[in-house]
Image: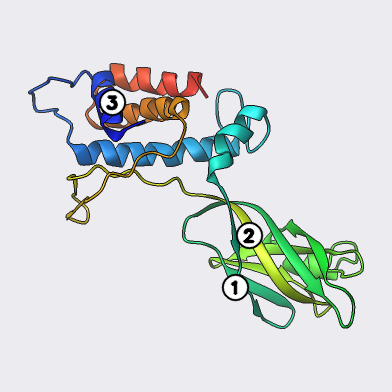
């Protein structure tokens, strides 16, 4: 869907297509509310806080809707004695999995099963014989801390390579010629929304409810909120 179509649809939902009153909506407000709505929609679908209470990959629709946000990136890992760490990407939104390949002595390289664990339980996990890193069982765990992925080895093996599979932030739309009041920078290009048209329609309702709340238009706020939830 073109940005021009998104603008028209949002002004239509707000009853501002030909309005000349003080509540005219500027382009930067549409961009800001739409980008905010994208993130809110994605987080709600991933966590399952929606009308059908379905989260990440819990139904065919969720798999289909969210697959565009799934990405894979090789981690530039560094050895820190009993664990390896690598920085998470800047567009990181939510964990999916880590693929790690380990080697021990002259043994053949092995793909590890990496479990996502809580940093608070680190010491307990390293002491638990059934959960601590094991090259023989090809299992270990990883935690997130300070913007890094920590993959633990407990001196049992070495990590040769690792890939992070994750949900990224949605790409922010830009409207050419629109000036961002926060940075005072004018957009020189159009960046379209990456989602399918049916999802964009839902995000438009979400964005309309945000704008309607900002200008205290309660009828449009209620309609936008209900429309966004009803079509999740």
Q: Position of residue 37 (x, y in %)?
A: 39, 36
Viewer-proximal residue among 227 and 102: 102
Q: CA distance from mark 2 to mark 3?
A: 36 Å
Looking at the rendered structure, which numbered label has been put on residue 164?
Answer: 2
Under circle 1, the secondary element is: loop
Q: Which mark is residue 10?
A: 3
Q: Are dots 2 and 3 in contact, CB under 8 Å?
A: no
Q: Residues within 10 Å of mark 1 (few under 14, many from 20)?
A: few
For numbered disc 2, what is the local secondary structure? strand
Q: Please report the residue visible at 53 percent of the width from the left and 45 percent of the height from the top.
A: 69
* Mark carried by residue 76: 1
Q: Is residue 11 left or right of residue 94?
A: left
Badge 1 or badge 3: first in the primary sequence = 3
Nearer to us in this view, 184 or 215: 184
Q: Residue at x 68, y 33 (%)?
A: 58
Looking at the picture, tell me which residue is in the foreground, 168 or 227.
Answer: 168
Which badge, 2 or 3, is on the more N-terminal residue?
3
């Amino acid at each position: 869907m073109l940005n021009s179509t998104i603008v028209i649809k949002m002004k239509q939902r707000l009853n501002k297509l030909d309005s000349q009153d003080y509540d005219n909506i500027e382009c930067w407000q549409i961009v800001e509310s739409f980008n905010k709505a994208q993130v809110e929609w994605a987080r709600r679908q991933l966590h399952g806080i929606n009308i059908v209470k379905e989260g990440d990959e819990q139904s065919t629709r969720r798999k289909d809707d969210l697959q565009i946000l799934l990405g894979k990136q090789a981690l530039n890992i560094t050895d820190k004695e009993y664990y390896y760490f690598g920085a998470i990407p800047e567009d990181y939104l939510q964990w999916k999995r880590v693929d790690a390949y380990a080697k021990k002595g002259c043994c053949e390289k092995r793909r590890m099963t990496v479990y996502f664990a809580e940093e608070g339980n680190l010491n307990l996990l390293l002491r638990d014989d059934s959960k601590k890193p094991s090259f023989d069982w090809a299992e270990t765990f990883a935690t997130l801390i300070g913007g890094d992925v920590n993959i633990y080895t407990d001196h049992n093996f070495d990590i040769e390579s690792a890939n992070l599979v994750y949900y990224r932030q949605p790409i922010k739309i830009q409207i050419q010629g629109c000036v961002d009041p926060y940075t005072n920078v004018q957009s020189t290009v159009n960046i379209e929304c990456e989602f399918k048209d049916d999802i964009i329609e839902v995000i438009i309702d979400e964005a309309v409810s945000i704008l309607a709340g900002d200008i205290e238009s309660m009828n449009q706020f209620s309609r936008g909120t209900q429309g966004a939830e009803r079509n999740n």
